[in-house]
Image (cartoon, grey):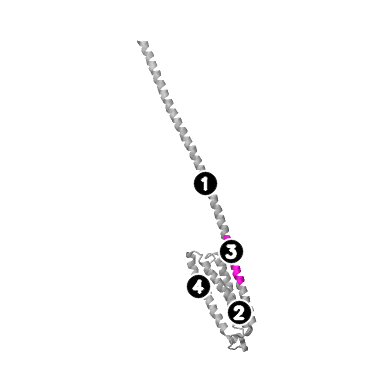
Amino acid sequence: MANPLDTDAGSELFSSYESELKLVQADLNQKLDQITELSGEPRKSAVRLAERSLEEAVELLDQMRLEKQNIPSATRSRINPRFRNYETDIDAAKRKLKSLSDDRRALFGNRYSDNPNGGDEQLEQRQQLLSGTDRLDRSSRRLRDSQRVANETEDIGRGTLADLQLQRETIQHTRATMLESEGYVDRSVKTLRGMARRMATNRIITVAIITVLIILIIAVVYSKFK
């Protein structure tokens, strides 16, 4: 029997298929063990039930094979040996069921003959119809599971787009604020330059006034001593 797969080894859908496969395998093995104890009509019915369980197991294994391709390669390398164990188990069950099905004397009891067309054809057709209905139900269930996963993925995508849109608006607002701040800085620089020019002008005027006053003082002093 294959080893259990770690819950973090694959996608949610893969793990769901795997859990379902384990249940189907256990049921299949139980049915195969029961077949060896039966004969005649009960044995034929048990073989048909085992065939349906085997078909379901094969379908689950195919679904797991598809989902396995969506798992990252690093994790997939750990899954592959375990997945091959599942394949080995299913192949062994196929061989055992074929061996039990080929035992026609056990299947038909005293009514056994070499005529391959013998038996209850209506019962066979009814069993085939039931088998087809079961397969259709299982396929529909798996389709619903796939649709559910697709809807969840779509919801996540919409949430991601909404987050990206919010981040874009935040970046645009920040950029506008930066541009406005740059405008304030430019105006402040112009104001400081104007103040510096006025200060330089005032300094020149002050120096000129002081120079004129000194000249006048010297002229007054000179005129008194002349």
> What is the tally of numbered marks visible in this picture?
4
- Viewport quadrant of the C terminus: top left
Name the kind of residue labelled 2 in the image: Arg
Tell me the SS state at disc 3: helix
What percent of the width, then of the height, locates residue 78?
Answer: 49, 68
What is the span of residues highlighted in magenta in the rendered image? 136-152
Of marks 1 and 2, which one's residue comes earlier in the chain?
Answer: 2
First in sequence: mark 4 vs mark 3: 4
The residue where tag 4 is placed is: 84
Res 188 seen here: yes
- Eyeballing the image, is 72 above or below 201? below
Mark 1 and mark 2: span between their CA atoms?
67 Å
224 lies left or right of 17? left
Estimate the spatial distance between the alpha carbons at disc 3 and disc 2, rounded to whole Å: 31 Å
The circle on residue 147 is: 3
For marks 1 and 4 on the same chain, the one whose residue lies earlier in the sequence: 4
Q: Residue 82, percent across and down? A: 51, 71
Labels 3 and 1: the sequence-earlier one = 3
- Indicate the amino acid at tag 4: Arg
**Circle 1 sits on which residue?**
172
Quick one: label 3, few (<14), some, or many (20+) residues within 10 Å? Answer: few
Q: Earlier in the sequence, mark 4 or mark 2?
A: 2
Within 10 Å of disc 1 (Cα), the crowding (few <14, some 14-19, many 20+) is few
Q: Observer-nearest residue: 124 or 162?
A: 124
Q: CA distance from mark 4 to mark 2?
A: 26 Å
- Disc number for residue 14: none
Tell me the distance, in whole angstroms, between the alpha carbons under discs 3 and 1: 37 Å
Q: Which type of secondary structure does the marked residue at label 1 adopt?
A: helix
Circle 2 Cα neighbour tier, 10 Å, few/some/many (<14 / 14–19 / ≥20): some
Q: Is residue 212 magenta?
A: no
Residue that badge 2 annotates: 48
